[in-house]
Image (spheres, rainbow, N blue to C red):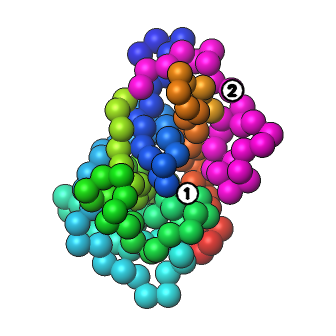
Amino acid sequence: MSDDHIEYVTARVDGQLFGLPILRVRDVFVPERITRVPLAEREITGLLNLRGRIVTILGMRQVLGFDAPRLVDPDADAASPMAIGVEHGGESYGLLVDSIGEVLRLEAAGFERNPFNLDPRVARVSCGVHRLETEIMIVLDIDRVLDVKAQAA
């Protein structure tokens, strides 16, 4: 990857395309056997054991403030929800999304700051956007996403 391009793992939440910088993504997996945490914040879907690591699962629908059930609707874009594994502060997290897309390699010059009319619920966890041919990809700031979790705690 050169300095003039950035690679993103893409995902959809409630029909909106999001991109996560590939350098922050540890893995992509199908979450199985999520254990609910009693009295946990709305954003925390639960915990799971992923190859010997305890992973906190955050529901991106809830983080983004979208009206949705606590677990992803089975009628969502994909047959089953997916999770994007990230690390932060020595802890493992899974970001629960409706579906995973492809890896996009985009020109760094195409990155724009958040537009003024971006939904504030989304803007608080986004660092900017890329305008694609048919839609806008919102770039998630992993640190802000996980800060939302910390603020909720």
Q: Amino acid at mark 1?
A: Leu
Q: Residue furthest right?
A: 116
Q: Amino acid at mark 2?
A: Glu
Disc 2 is placed on an element classified as: strand
Tell me where residue 138 sits by quadrant: top right
Task: Classify residue 102 as left or right of residue 7.
Answer: left
| Residue linked to disc 1 | 146
- Front one among 113 and 24: 113
* Label 1 packing within 10 angstroms: few (<14), some (14-19), many (20+): many
Task: Classify residue 66 as left or right of residue 83.
Answer: right
| Residue linked to disc 2 | 112
Does residue 19 show up magenta in the picture? no
Q: Residue 13 placed where, x, y %?
A: 47, 52
Residue 51 in view (yes/no): yes
Q: Residue furthest bottom?
A: 38
Tell me where residue 145 sits by quadrant: bottom right
Would you say the residues marked 2 and 1 are in contact, meaning their CB atoms lie under 8 Å apart? no
Q: Residue 99 placed where, x, y %?
A: 36, 49
Tell me where residue 49 sits by quadrant: bottom left
Residue 92 in view (yes/no): no
In what quadrant of the picture does the N terminus appear? top left
- Front one among 22 and 76: 76
**Image position of 108 with respect to 31: above or below:** above
Please state the extent of the stretch shown in magenta in the rendering: 104-128
Q: Residue at x 45, y 31 (%)?
A: 8
Q: Residue at x 41, y 25 (%)?
A: 104
**Image position of 39 with respect to 10: above or below:** below
Disc 1 is placed on an element classified as: helix
**Which mark is on residue 126?**
none
Q: Residue at x 23, y 66 (%)?
A: 32
